[in-house]
Image (cartoon, rainbow, N blue to C red):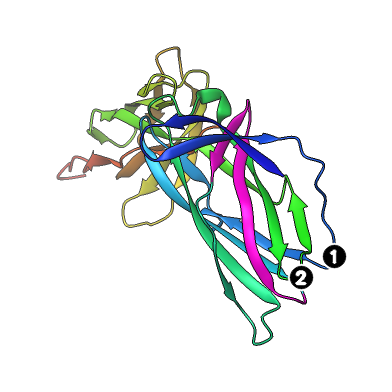
Amino acid sequence: MVLCAVAAIGAVAIVLVPATSPETSRGDTGLVSVVVNHGRTVELGPAETRTVAVEVTASDRSGIRAVDPIGLWGPNYGALKVGPMSCVPLDAAGTTARCSGEAVIAAGSRALFDDQAGTWFVDLRIRAADGDRYVSKNAAGFSLKRTAGFDLASVVPARAAVGGAVTVRGRLRRADWDRDAEVPQQGTTAYLQFRPAGSSTWSTLASTGTDADGLLSLNVPVRGPGAFQWYAPGDKWTGGALSEVLPLRVDAPESHPGR
């Protein structure tokens, strides 16, 4: 397997493109597991750089010598290098080892583009002490997504009477890696949730879609005090988002002496 360097990005990241190779696995070398970012989705904001852990567990009767080379590749020729892997035996016989390294993923300086969000894969070669090897271009997959977030969230009026109505607004934006900025996320469904005062449970009241400016607005009846929040679940390319909590105060009913 050969990983061909094609560009150096900034001072820390080197972009690699997996090259076609006739190399195949041989012997009893086996892959036990591959974990990227501790099994969690990697989400990057505009111009953000993150260092993520890459962990490979492998076995061979003769012991594991190294995991090299190893890289990450994704949609539209996305490719990243994983730094040197350090291997530690997990059993007394030394037949199973866990090898750990790190990858630097940068959304700034045009190192990563919007159309490269989605499912990424680990391309690796595991080398055993006796010359055996395990080779895979799809050893494991993980999600790399653009961050999303709400702003301009409000409830108007913030104080109302039972039986009245309030308008809850917000704006949904997401990272634009191409422009190193946050931009409106249009045509996306978001859910308005409510939590009654004294409760810890949120329930969904309604859903609506964002307009061309990422704006949301819903009119809802007032049934009691509590708080609202907006929720967008995200998708394969964009992370989920929660707005700030928006308290709603409710006026006590007017008293009518003599009734």
Left-right relation of 79 to 138: left
Label 2 belongs to which residue?
130
Left-right relation of 190 to 149: right
**Residue stretch rendered in magenta on the structure:** 61-81
The percent position of residue 4, horizontal first and vertical second, equals 62, 35
Give the residue at x 51% y 33%.
238
Give the residue at x 70% y 62%.
127
Camera-side residue: 228 or 254?
228
Residue 233 shows up from this direction: no
Residue 104: image quadrant is top left
* Kind of residue at badge 1: Gly
Question: Where is the C terminus found, in terms of image quarters?
Answer: top left
Residue 27: image quadrant is bottom right
Residue 96: image quadrant is bottom right
* Kind of residue at badge 2: Asp
The percent position of residue 99, horizontal first and vertical second, equals 58, 65
Crowd rating for badge 1 (residues with CA inside 10 Å; few <14, some 14–19, many 20+): few
Q: Is residue 72 magenta?
A: yes
Camera-side residue: 73 or 213?
73
Sequence order check, earlier mark of 1 and 2: 1
The percent position of residue 6, horizontal first and vertical second, equals 55, 29
Label 1 belongs to which residue?
27
Residue 247, label in figure: none
Q: Secondary structure at mark 2?
A: loop
Residue 4 shows up from this direction: yes
Asked if residue 158 is positioned above or below residue 257 in the image, the reply reads: above
Asked if residue 177 is positioned above or below residue 259 in the image, the reply reads: above
